[in-house]
Image: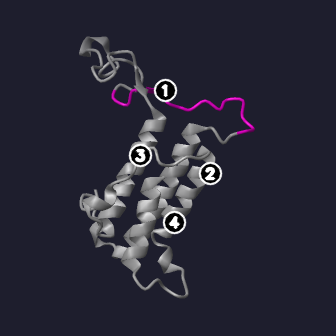
Amino acid sequence: IIKKKGLDTLPKQELLNNSVLALQVEICELANEWRGFKHWSEDREPRNESLVECKECKGTGLVTGNPDDGWCEYCSSNGFIESNPMLEEYVDCLHFFLSIAWQIGLSTDDLYAWEDQLEGETTILFTELLINVGQINGDQIFANKPKDVFQHRREHFKASLYI
């Protein structure tokens, strides 16, 4: 995507800064679809099922709006498509994790995360995740920079991925 969109012309640090912020936004969007933190809401159920209007037929179920032209195969002619908003946000997060890993030069070994080793309240885990993601490029704000910037970024990336 970076090359396809022409983002490879951006300075590397600017691209990383933008990617880290984009990942944090996607994490917040994932939390928003999870909804568990919304203690004020009567609807705290995760958004893992949704019907959205078909973009191909604009909800008509028809290829062109005219039955003579045929039915929309994209939505099986019902005008709507099933989606899983929470899963879509999760996939967006994974995309940015991989993009950041590539940008900071991590190896495939760095992408390994232990399973079932972390326990905690989901709201706290989301907060910790946002903090660790922010620290991936946090060396940019320190008066005293870390001696090994790569190691600093690597450790915070791995901690984020672990969560």
| Residue at 37% over, 31% down | 55
Residue 73 position, x and y percent, is 27, 20
Question: Who comes first in sequence, dot 3 or dot 1?
Answer: 1
Residue wearing tag 1:
50
Q: Amino acid at mark 3?
A: Glu
| Residue at 53% over, 46% down | 29
Of labels 2 and 4, the one closer to you: 2
Which residue is nearer to you in this view: 18 or 133?
133
In the picture, residue 6 is in which quadrant? bottom left
Residue wearing tag 4:
134
Q: Amino acid at mark 4?
A: Gly
Instruction: Measure the alpha-carbon separation of dots 2 and 4.
Output: 15 Å
Figure check: 60 above or below 148: above
Question: Who comes first in sequence, dot 2 or dot 1?
Answer: 1
Task: Look at the image and tell me whether residue 84 can be seen.
Answer: yes
Neighbor class of circle 4 (other Cα within 10 Å; few <14, some 14-19, many 20+) is many
**Disc ID at residue 124:** 2
In the picture, residue 61 is in which quadrant? top left
Neighbor class of circle 2 (other Cα within 10 Å; few <14, some 14-19, many 20+) is few
Kindly check if marks 1 and 4 are in contact, taking CB atoms under 8 A apart as contact.
no
Question: Who comes first in sequence, dot 3 or dot 4?
Answer: 3
| Range of residues picked out in magenta | 39-56
Q: Amino acid at mark 2?
A: Ile
| Residue at 46% over, 27% down | 52
